[in-house]
């Protein structure tokens, strides 16, 4: 094996399980992400499977962000004997224990004392790093590898990782993209391309498509809520706890703020006013509430527009009409109340694909009532209840979905609200890969389905030909 070199322990067959090892010499390496394969990518029992590679010589685990498909195998890494540092941004350092606590409870142990011990151990390994500053990871005669985190715009604390490997007389800059954010995130600062990359390990989730304009999504959200108010129904939004929920809250607060300034309730068909000021926004997810608290506390990492709202005295993630539901008993009360009264409300609950979590009880109670609406703002994996419900959008006739082994009629309206992707599209990925002064020597495409990687590779080749760049594009298997 020549050094430095790459090996991949996940993230090459689909969009989950990211885990990449950078070998610096025969006895020294670092790991970038240690994610869990999920959905169609995962083999049965993946949550509790052994790690599958040797941890000896790994100097550090560097985390790009805290989604489970990038951190979910950390328990297996520790079980295999890893005791080195876990390097990440400060927001990721705050969020990682919350995400892993939920994962531990679901897949390893629900015993509180055991979970607490594991999390305390992990907290002792976490080393938060500032953005845009080099950190010496390895430094000895003939070998050095400082690393640097740069904002990736995917969710709070997300980073891409620059590794400046100096091996004997050679210098090679490796860049691991992690997950790159789409343009127009309302809370986060935009990502900037790296200044240099000899080897770029690039995600390709949406390498085969272009996103609709993000600026339209807020108006589409407002229009959908106006319809729900007119129908005197509840809008159910299945959303994952981290990232998407905070974006929704931010945009809902802005809609409510502008409606309050206008102070003009719209007319309903029966003559009653549509009063946005009385519309409850219900966040029914304990994990999302804890994550939102961290987001609020780390507002220094928000973009300038979001921080300006705070300076105006607004609280985009903690406004007065936001109601948090904590206990299961309280959750069941809210479900029964909305079902029986038909009072208009917006409910944000997990999980995002309707395959578990509190959203399932809302769906059981309300799917059969045409006053209500299910609004999807995220990807629905094939075979999940969310995908079945989403496929009913605009359909006519009798449709049912299986929830916990029982069939439920779908008579509620179904809407997919485009523009909420947290991943860069093909144009964004190409901009990232070509936004540096000199061409990368090599680009390694990961974190994408086969078709997305193939289309992105072709698009990159066409762009490189126009730039007269000679860059090798590799797709590991």
Image (spheres, helix red, strand yellow):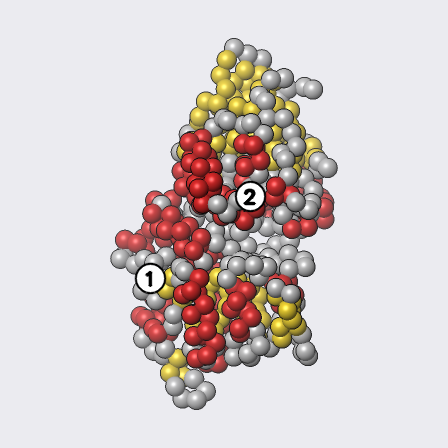
In the image, residue 138 lies at what x, y percent?
A: 50, 19
- On the image, the x and y values in percent for residue 180 come to 54, 44
- Spot the residue most to the bottom: 270
Which numbered mark, 1 or 2, is in the foreground of this view?
2
Q: Residue at x 40, y 41 (%)?
A: 94
Do the CB atoms of the residues marked 1 and 2 lie less than 8 Å apart? no
Task: Determine the CA span between mark 1 and mark 2.
Answer: 36 Å
In the image, residue 327 sits, relative to residue 69, either above or below, namely below
The residue that disc 1 covers is 319
At a point 66% along the width and 42% down the height, the residue shown is: 460
Instruction: Name the outermost residue toward the top.
Output: 141
Q: Give me the disc on residue 158.
A: none
Secondary-structure class at tag 1: loop
Q: x%, y% of residue 64?
A: 51, 38
The residue that label 2 is drawn on is 108
* Residue 16 sits above or below residue 315 on the image: above
Q: Nearer the viewer, residue 103 or 315?
A: 103
Q: Residue 463 in the image: x percent, y percent?
A: 65, 42
């Amino acid at each position: 094996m020549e050094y430095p070199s790459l090996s991949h322990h996940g993230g090459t067959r689909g969009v989950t399980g990211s885990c990449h090892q950078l070998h610096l010499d025969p006895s020294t390496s670092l790991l970038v992400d240690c994610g869990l394969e999920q959905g169609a990518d995962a083999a049965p029992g993946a949550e509790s499977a052994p790690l599958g590679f040797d941890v000896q010589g790994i100097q550090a685990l560097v985390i790009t962000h805290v989604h489970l498909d990038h951190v979910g195998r950390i328990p297996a890494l520790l079980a295999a004997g890893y005791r080195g540092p876990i390097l990440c941004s400060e927001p990721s350092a705050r969020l990682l224990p919350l995400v892993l606590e939920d994962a531990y409870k679901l897949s390893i142990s629900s015993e509180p004392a055991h979970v607490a011990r594991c999390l305390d151990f992990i907290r002792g390994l976490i080393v938060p790093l500032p953005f845009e500053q080099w950190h010496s990871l390895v430094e000895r005669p003939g070998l050095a590898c400082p690393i640097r985190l740069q904002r990736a715009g995917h969710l709070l604390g997300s980073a891409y990782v620059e590794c400046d490997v100096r091996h004997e007389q050679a210098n090679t800059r490796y860049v691991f993209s992690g997950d790159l954010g789409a343009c127009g995130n309302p809370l986060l600062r935009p990502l900037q391309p790296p200044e240099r990359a000899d080897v770029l390990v690039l995600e390709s989730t949406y390498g085969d498509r272009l996103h609709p304009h993000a600026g339209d999504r807020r108006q589409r959200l407002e229009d959908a809520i106006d319809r729900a108010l007119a129908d005197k129904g509840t809008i159910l939004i299945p959303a994952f706890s981290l990232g998407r929920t905070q974006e929704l809250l931010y945009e809902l607060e802005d809609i409510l703020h502008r409606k309050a300034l206008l102070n003009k309730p719209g007319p309903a068909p029966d003559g009653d006013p549509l009063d946005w000021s009385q519309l409850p926004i219900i966040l029914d997810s304990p994990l999302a509430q804890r994550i939102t608290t961290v987001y609020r506390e780390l507002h220094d990492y928000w973009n300038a527009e979001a921080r300006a709202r705070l300076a105006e005295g607004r609280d985009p993630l903690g406004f007065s009409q936001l109601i948090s539901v904590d206990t299961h008993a309280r959750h069941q009360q809210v479900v029964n109340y909305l079902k029986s009264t038909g009072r208009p409300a917006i409910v944000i609950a997990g999980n995002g694909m309707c395959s578990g979590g509190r959203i399932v009880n809302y769906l059981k109670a309300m799917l059969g009532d045409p006053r209500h609406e299910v609004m999807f703002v995220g990807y629905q994996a094939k075979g999940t209840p969310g995908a079945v419900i989403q496929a009913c959008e605009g359909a006519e006739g009798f449709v049912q979905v299986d929830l916990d082994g029982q069939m439920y009629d779908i008579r509620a309206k179904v809407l997919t609200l485009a523009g909420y992707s947290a991943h860069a599209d093909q144009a964004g990925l190409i901009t990232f890969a070509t936004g540096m002064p000199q061409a990368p020597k090599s680009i390694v495409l990961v974190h994408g389905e086969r078709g997305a990687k193939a289309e992105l590779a072709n698009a990159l080749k066409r762009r490189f030909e126009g730039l007269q760049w000679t860059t090798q594009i590799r797709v590991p298997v």
